[in-house]
Image (cartoon, rainbow, N blue to C red):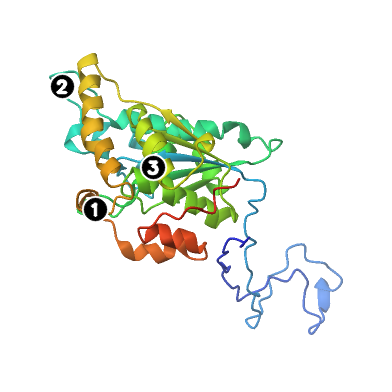
Amino acid sequence: MAAPATPSRKLPKSNFHTANTTSAEAPVTGPDAGRVDANPAPQTNDDFTHPDHVIPPRDYTGFENLVIVCCHAIFHPDASSSEFPLHSPCEEKNWHLAPFQRSNPETGKPGEHETFVAHALAGIDVLKSELSPHVPDKTLLVFSGGATKSSLTSLSEARSYYHAALAQELAQGNHGGGRAHQLFSRGKILLEEHATDSFQNLLFSILLFRRTTGRYPKQVRIITHAFKAKRFLDLHAPTIRWPADRIQVQGIDPVMSGAEREETVKGEEKFGYAPWVEDPLGTGEVLAGKRRNRGWDERVLMQLTEGLEMTVDELFSGTVPEQLPWSAA
């Protein structure tokens, strides 16, 4: 099995060196003779060059499980700004939302950004037990979503969800970034920044797990809206021949009244589920058009499949092989 590619990262070179001893070339005479200076002046050597280092790759041995958080909007505050902790992900104004995702004061409908925060935090909660140094790492969390609102920001949905989780931790007083920063810095949170729909959320995240660990996950958990579970379990997973006993959906829906839920389920059946029945790979006019409107660029396909099996290339070319590399655990 091919090992994951590991980019080399170099440390900056140093052009000086500090010495803690006095020079032997000019002996000290007079009243200072024999005195040892406790704080000698640093000596420099302009010819010294620190050798290049390659940072060792993270060891992903033992990782078996994949948790995917499907992203649906963009939390836009600048994470590099000193004012970032003041921008709560619980405030609607800090999100780029589609019209149907916004709050409606007349009906009392809250903005769906609250649900998106819940999705992100639910993903982090799955990994909370593995924050202990005594518990082996087995699970990778992937935030999946591309830069779907290029007219507003170049930020991807996936990166913005990580920022939202980070902002939530900071708002709660975790000045070091809390669990979100700790997991991200340890490489347990990955960002899949190309997906533009639910099918791509699933497939691209599985491929990212493969490129990162060198193997395919044994178990996949998808965190998304509960009313979308049928789409993943009955359509997307079977389309890529993912084993039914190795995928689960953790559904978290927005707050809805009975009438709103009924309308939402009907809308999902008509506009979310039905198009995938007719076009399982999403390459037809309707679904491919939605991808293009969300910024999908087919030129990234080579990057997504680099070093992977030939049958994966066939899948992207529009043919579903009888056997795919994840058919066996």
Residue positioned 45% across, 55% down in the render: 321
Q: Position of residue 44 (x, y in %)?
A: 66, 76
Could you tell whether 204 is left or right of 264 in the image? right
Please give the residue where the numbered disc 1 appears in the rendered image: 284
Q: Quadrant where the C terminus lies?
A: top right
**Disc 2 and disc 1 in contact, CB within 8 angstroms:** no
Residue positioned 63% across, 68% down in the render: 54
Figure check: 224 above or below 186: above
Instruction: Indicate which disc, 1 or 3, sits on the residue closer to the N terminus.
Output: 3
Mark 1 neighbour density, 10 Å: few (under 14) some (14–19) many (20 or more): few
Q: Position of residue 195 (x, y in %)?
A: 35, 50
Please give the residue where the numbered disc 3 appears in the rendered image: 236
Q: Which amino acid does label 3 sit on?
A: His
Please give the residue where the numbered disc 2 appears in the rendered image: 105
In which quadrant of the rendered view does residue 194 lie?
Answer: bottom left
Residue positioned 36% across, 42% down in the render: 84
Could you tell whether 135 is left or right of 226 in the image? right
Q: What residue type is labelled 2?
A: Pro
Q: Which residue lies furthest to the right in this view?
A: 34
Q: Position of residue 257 (x, y in %)?
A: 24, 16
Q: Which residue lies furthest to the front in this view?
A: 322
Instruction: Indicate which disc, 2 or 1, sits on the residue closer to the N terminus.
Output: 2
Q: Quadrant where the N terminus lies?
A: bottom right
Residue positioned 25% across, 31% down in the render: 269
Q: Where is residue 254 in the image (x, y as percent from the top left)?
A: 30, 25
